[in-house]
Image (tube, rainbow, N blue to C red):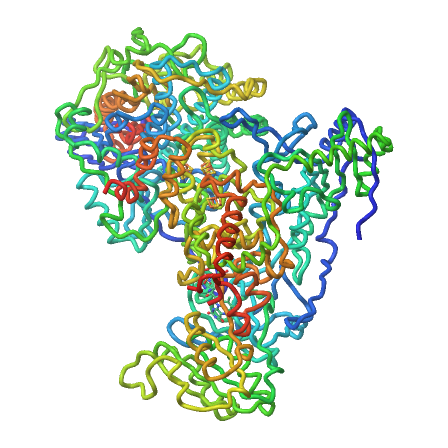
Amino acid sequence: MEKPMIYKVISKPEFKSFIDTLVKSNTAYGPKAVDTDRLGNPVYQFMHVQGADEIAFDYTVTHSSAKHLLLPFRDELSHYSFRDGDWDQEVRYDAPPIVLIGLRPCDINAINILDDVMLHGPYPSPYYLARRKNTFIIGMDHLPLADCFCKSMNRHTVNHGFNLFCSDIGDRYYLAINSANAFSFLKEFRIEDPSYEDNCNLIERRKSIKNSFATTVEVTGLPVFLDIEFDSPIWQKWGDKCLSCGSCAMVCPTCYCYSVEERFDIDLKGSTRQNHLYSCNLVDFAQVAGGHNFRPRNGDRLKYRYYHHYRGFAANDNQQICVGCNRCGRACLADINPKDVINDLRLERESCMTCVLPSPDKT
Amino acid sequence: MVSQIISNMKKVDFDIDLHHLPRVEGHGNIRISVKDGRLEEATWAVVETPRFFEVIVKGMNAERVPFLTSRICGICSISHSLTSIRALERAMEIQPPETARLIRLLAMHGETLQSHALHLFFLAAPDFFDAPSALPLMQSHPEIVQAGLQLKELGNEISAITTGRCTHPVSLVVGGVSKAPSKEALLKLRTMIAERRAALDMTTEFFMTLQIPAFVRETEFISLCNGSTYPSIGGDLVSTDGVVHDENDYLLMTNEYLTEFSTSKFTKVSRQSSAAGALARFNNNFSLLHPQARAAAAAFGLEPVCHNPFMNNVAQLVECHHIMADAAMLVDRLLDADLHDIRTAFKPKAGKATGAVEAPRGVLYHHMETDDEGKVVKADCIIPTTQNNANIHYDLHALAEQALQEGKTEKETEKLCVMLVRSYDPCISCSVH
Amino acid sequence: MHDMRFTIPGQDLNREPFAFKAPDFQKKCEVMITDRGYKCRITNIVPLSDNERLFLLRIVDPVEREMFNFRPGQFLMLEVPGYGEAPISISSSTSNHEFIELCIRRAGHVTSALFETRQGAMVSIRGPFGTSFPMELMEGKNVLMVVGGLGIAPMRAPLFWIGNHRDRYLDVRLLFGAKDPSQLLFDYQFEGWQRVSNVKMHTIVEHADESWKGRKGLITALFDEFTFDAKETYAIVCGPPVMFKFVCHHLDLMGIPMNRMFVSLERRMHCGMGKCCRCMVGSTFTCLDGPVFDYWSVLNLKEAI
Amino acid sequence: MKHLGFNIGKVKIGSFDFTCCEGCQLQLANRESTLPDFLALIDVRNFREISSERFDDYDIALVEGSVTRSDEIERLKKIRAQAKVLVAFGSCACFGGVNSLKNGIPQEEAVREVYDGKTIETMPSTRIADIVSVDYCIPGCPVSKEEVERILVGMVTRSLVSLPKYPVCVECKQRLNICLFDLGQLCLGPVTRAGCDAVCPTGRTACLGCRGPAEDINFPSFEQLVRDKKLSSSEMREMLGFYNGFADYLEHEKS
Ligand SMILES: Cc1cc2nc3c(=O)[nH]c(=O)nc-3n(C[C@H](O)[C@H](O)[C@H](O)COP(=O)(O)OP(=O)(O)OC[C@H]3O[C@@H](n4cnc5c(N)ncnc54)[C@H](O)[C@@H]3O)c2cc1C
Ligand code: SF4
Ligand code: SF4
Ligand code: SF4
């Protein structure tokens, strides 16, 4: 059931002072210009911010997603304290409250997907739950970049998973308030009920966003395609390009596969078990003790990333977990991006269809 | 305590042959031979394996050079890197932005502080307790060692924050620095410096209790001097004998020559030998030290011009006081500076120049010549320890002579000689590069 | 400037017991601990061969010990504090609440550390995890168990189960193949399995010296030693990945329906809970949907064999 | 300490330097906050740089630097004979390091240039593994103290130790850096073994591959990347040759 939402409008300066107050009273993260690339364009990342003026409200896209604020790259799972021959285990789900500002609809959708993965199913993750419950999310809509394809993934709009969502309607923001907390904060500022004109502006804004998507990726029926194309030579073709560098998974808002390792404390008085973000593209992802690697070739590994993203895994209801932000495509040095790979796959399939050949035999 | 031993002029015979002297950086040997109570030989030989940096740097892209030359020495990598950068920037007429200049100065402080702390606590201090290393001191004087570690950590932290890592800097580049420290990091440094003052005071009190051997040999001390600040990066080359040269005329200040027994070269200026290092800087620039540092010097009774090489350790400590005060000021200036304007873009061009930097152990020279593409066509590096080798050698002779006069035993003589070499804090692997 | 009214209230989950949604499919036990382990004492270590040992674990807390239930074929995550975690099949009888037996090969970080431990050492386990062999389904039928080498580890639990409920099954056979005679683990129990549990045993090794009196060759060679009614038979196959293909193919030729053959798959695992994604076969998790699969599903899984 | 029923004791360590800058050994005295704990793990039997006591009963030898003179070969063999475990410590020991850059220059010419005329013995810089067998490699210029701590703790606790198999980009991305390729620079991150926490790209300078190649790298694709980005392939070679870690790949290319 969708929770009821309250709609308000706020002027931009007032909004800024609202954010400023929030940021100053809490640990907050927002998009910040951290650098300029060689074409002179600013580069944004979600960073710790201490005032509203540090936040780039009109940013385009961040290089990395905000995933690591909910699923840290390295996270402590448990700590052992040793005492002669015996030990005590301590498990804590420490998660100080944070405010996340400026998430795009696709980013929020990505968090919703992570919620599905981490909190549903037989073994919900308490670590994730603690962080998720302690995160206050303020979303913002945006005009897509030329290579965004979240519309194709149907992730360009969002109606849950945030506390507050702001749409830019010219000189003011149209607010969708989705939590009591957010509403009680906002009550201290000058907010108004949306006028008829505001509503029209919002619809205009939505339309123009919807119509600005320049990249489409045809994903209907893709799960079946992926199953059929499992042994397609296409994978090795792209695999030959792949550097197995894991950049795509690191920046992706929904890649969550991880590795667990345990380390002694340097004083040998205890040890910690940590998980850290891994990537199915990395060479030893599926390598087992004794050296056997279930996915020895770049192509096998690359395929799995696509398989996971566009077919989905059974335990996550077979849902596609890609939200179409194309961060992986931008980060990939080998110029591999979902659009090209999927189109290639479809193309191959379609040519296959015409000659009515079954997919090649398993090797 | 050592000097209290009553002299007995027995005719003694002994040979001291210390192969690969421990607790110094690199490989050096001491040979002392005494026959019938007469000193026959006292030599200081460097037996480090040569690495030919001056040859391999040829043909290399100027931009990559600092990353190579920093590998001349693990302890003073920042100095090497900055010296190359200075030479190349002067050769290609590049003006680094002011902020970068401040960051580099701070980086130098970090390195010097860590190097001095390392030397004072890990290499020099054990001798005063007849301990083989600092490890027993950790048990016997835990608070003192802790204070030393705190200073060293501060030095490393300054280097890491300014250059990306404490050994072999990553963000010092020709034209400026590639990345500025963040405001948060600088604020952290500011508190850290303030907090660690106590450790420095404790260290000072501790060193006051140690008995520095009494030994004097008239020496010419060489350092940089710029007339306005305590020397660090660049300046005129001066000596306590009144010699002054321009930075580019470094050859006149070194006059390298080869000896039979050493892979490192020897140098001289007005006398048989000369010395560089903390004591040399102190002797030439006393008035430019921070008042706190001057006060510390006074507490030790150290005044310019001091000719006791063992006092180099005290001069290092005095410099630590200066560094702490100056670093705090630099951090404040950086907090007000524009941390975005840190790198000047440049077009490679042909040129030649020398860079001189006060490394922890003394003046370091890199001379570089570039071609139109900014590739290095000729390089020359003269390292502080190279400039000290001759002085160590002749000091050893005088010290052994004095020890004989005072009737020191073989063991006592050996200990004094070893302490003498250590007091110079020689960095031998760098002297053979 | 700092205004407490705008501070996001933190929710301290450490103080509230974490509420689980009780899983309701066959892989259940009363308490499901996913992040904290049960503390166990290693009460005995039995050397089986140069590189394999049997570890007997006893859960320290009596309540937890009583509650720890599992089904044949399930595995647990064994943690050696300081060294890490590894998935290990439970190799003991489901009716044995006193001890958990694990048959382990020294392979890498965790297992090597385990081999250093002594009797009395404390380790930790999480689980049980994964699917199990459908023992009820096989009732009233023949059971053919095919084991290669260390595959005996997951096979012991169903063997014990059958021993405990022998009257519910018809003909039960265990085919055991190994590289050499020393790899025929638990040979000291063969006698008991045959006589007490009435399991017919066939063994074969690949290499052996003169002292070996039995057969030499690949495990598939054993199929000519007996006949059975394929329509009335269930098969369980455990062993190295290469073995599945040949054995299952053979069983298929003999007429055992594919959905009546069960295999236990092995993949790299880091969590056991369907989160780390290391153990994917096709779009399924070995830890949640496996390790026990029927052969029909396996054939349809991508990259399974 | 007794843990899991077996004793964990100190390891006897010797640290030795060959031709190098001694920066890696220096790391052993860094990371001051954990230094007392670190030193408590080891029993320093032979470490010229910090102690004048020298014993020859070490079990683990950390060998820093490459071999460039014949007397070093003898010294190294003696160390090998004594040590139960010999660790190549740092890039010079693992690959030959920056010292190897002189291998491309005729030795006599080099000597003439630096020592004008004096005879100085020198030989091509050789990595430790070419002379004696090596049990572990800890690459890095300098080594990362954090990794050294982890590996030594592993040795003390008798756990297996291993290096990351994946490339530097993983860590670089985790530090939220801007990729240097986006800034128009060349970086060896995609082919270099991780474990340094991507210090160089984090300082906005190119990774020069001091940790050697990652496992099973896709070298052709990396070369293609350099071409696609219109970067100079001679510069790429200069970078790959910097620490000599990629000798196999460069060699391959020549033939
Ligand atoms: C369902 C299942 C049941 C198993 N049952 C047994 C058993 O009863 N007896 C036995 O000896 N072995 C069993 N194994 C294999 C055992 O898990 C591996 O030998 C063990 O994980 C090696 O861990 P390591 O730390 O010693 O090796 P390392 O090579 O150091 O591996 C590091 C980590 O990778 C993972 N990993 C590596 N290899 C495997 C692998 N083959 N399977 C799963 N994860 C792996 C583990 O998380 C391990 O901690 C089983 C594996 C699975 C999947
Ligand atoms: S797809 Fe691209 S980013 Fe991802 S691992 Fe391969 S090369 Fe790296
Ligand atoms: S900067 Fe270098 S290490 Fe970082 S992502 Fe780019 S190529 Fe990889
Ligand atoms: S980034 Fe590259 S050069 Fe720098 S430390 Fe890491 S591996 Fe070495």
Reply above or below: A31 against A112: above
Quarter holding the N terminus of chain B is top left
Q: Nearer the viewer, residue C63 or B42?
A: C63
> Which quarter of the picture shows residue A191?
top right
Task: Answer with left or right where residue B323 lies relative to residue A177.
Answer: left
Residue D78: x and y, percent?
Answer: 22, 49
Q: Residue at x 35, y 30 (%)?
A: D232
Reply above or below: C186 against C114: below
Task: Answer with left or right where residue B101 lies relative to residue B74.
Answer: right
Reply above or below: B252 against A322: above
Residue D35: x and y, percent?
Answer: 46, 42
Quarter holding the C terminus of chain B is top left
Q: Looking at the image, which residue sits at the far front? A: A354
Q: Residue at x 29, y 17 (%)?
A: B371
Q: Residue at x 40, y 63 (%)?
A: A290
Residue A273: x and y, percent?
Answer: 55, 54
